[in-house]
Each structure stands twice: as C-alpha cells, then as structure tokens.
Amino acid sequence: MTVFLLPFRSLTAIAAVSLLCSAAALAAPPTAATEAQARYRQDMTACNSGQSHQDLATCRREAGNALAEARRGHLNDAPGQYQQNALRRCQVHEGEDRLACEARMGASGSTEGSAATGGILREAVTVTPVK
C-alpha cells in the first residue's frame, strides 16, 4: 500500500512546486523582451496613426529594426546615454569652442525646435567683460 502513496506524494509535491514556480514567473517584473515587444506595439501604433512624422514604410521598418536590436540586447535606452552622446559631439572642438559647445548641450543653454520640424536650435549666452 505504501508503494502507491509514495509516487502520489511525489506527484503532489511536483505539482505544488510547479504551481509555485509558475505563479512566481507571472508575478515577476516584465523582461526586456516583453518591454521591447510593448515598445514595438507603441511604435507601430504611432506609425499607423501618422504621428511619427515619417512615411509609413520607413516608420514600420524602423520599428522592426528597433525590436530586433532590443532582442539582441544592443538597444540601449539608458537615461544618461543621451547626455553622454551629446557631450561626445563636443570633443571635436578645442578650447573655448569646446566649452561653449558643452554649455549649449548642458542645462545652461536654451533649446527650441524639434527633429520633426527640421532641427533643434541650442543657444547658450556667455557674457565676456570688456577689456
């Protein structure tokens, strides 16, 4: 009689562990893959509604490319990455020009326009005393 109870208890234990693991997996935060898929759906919605300021074929291709890069782990949306890229553009300048470029890219400058309207104009005012 105990021969049949042991496998039943084992099956019950395996079922309980499986149930707990699946519940933990459902409660886990979204993975990068699910976040990428959600972002893709948002991008496609923007494409189909005409809010992307691109033609439909280009918008869909870019959304697909972004999804593929996110799945490969090459798409980096780190918050500080944008600022680092902006300051790297100033490395081609030297001296005062570089300082002025960094001021325009930093918080001290003003910004107007957008990429959708054709460009972003950055301005920083530096006051120099008369000698």
Image: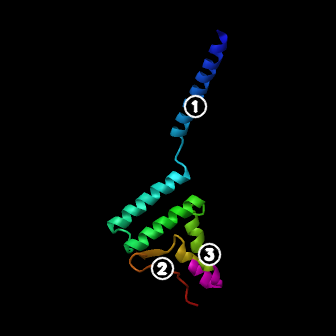
What residue would you read off at disc 1?
Answer: 18
- Specify the principal SS of the magenta part: helix
Quick check: is 89 in the magenta stretch? Answer: no
Residue ID at (58%, 22%): 12
Kind of residue at badge 3? Arg
| C-alpha separation, residue under disc 3 versus residue under disc 1 | 50 Å
Q: CA distance from mark 3 to mark 2?
A: 18 Å
Q: Around disc 1, counting alpha carbons within 10 Å, would you say few (fewer than 14), some (14 to 19), or many (20 or more)?
A: few
The one nearer the camera, 128 or 71, is 71
Looking at the image, residue 110 lies above or below residue 14:
below
Gap in angstroms between the C-alphas marked 2 and 1 = 60 Å
Q: Quadrant of residue 118?
A: bottom left
Does 123 sit above or below residue 19?
below
Where's residue 9, x and y in %? 62, 18
Q: Amino acid at mark 1?
A: Ser
The residue labelled by disc 3 is 88
Give the residues in magenta. 91-101
The image quadrant where one finds the N terminus is top right
Residue of label 2: 123
Q: Residue at x 53, y 81 (%)?
A: 126
Which quadrant of the figure has residue 85? bottom right
Sequence-wise, which precedes: disc 3 or disc 1?
A: 1
Query: Residue 61, how many percent across, how many down?
Result: 46, 70
Of marks 3 and 2, the one in the foreground: 3
The local secondary structure at tag 1 comes to: helix
Residues at marks 3 and 1 touching, judged by CB atoms closer than 8 Å: no
User: Which color mode does the image show?
Assistant: rainbow
- In which image quadrant can residue 50 be found? bottom left
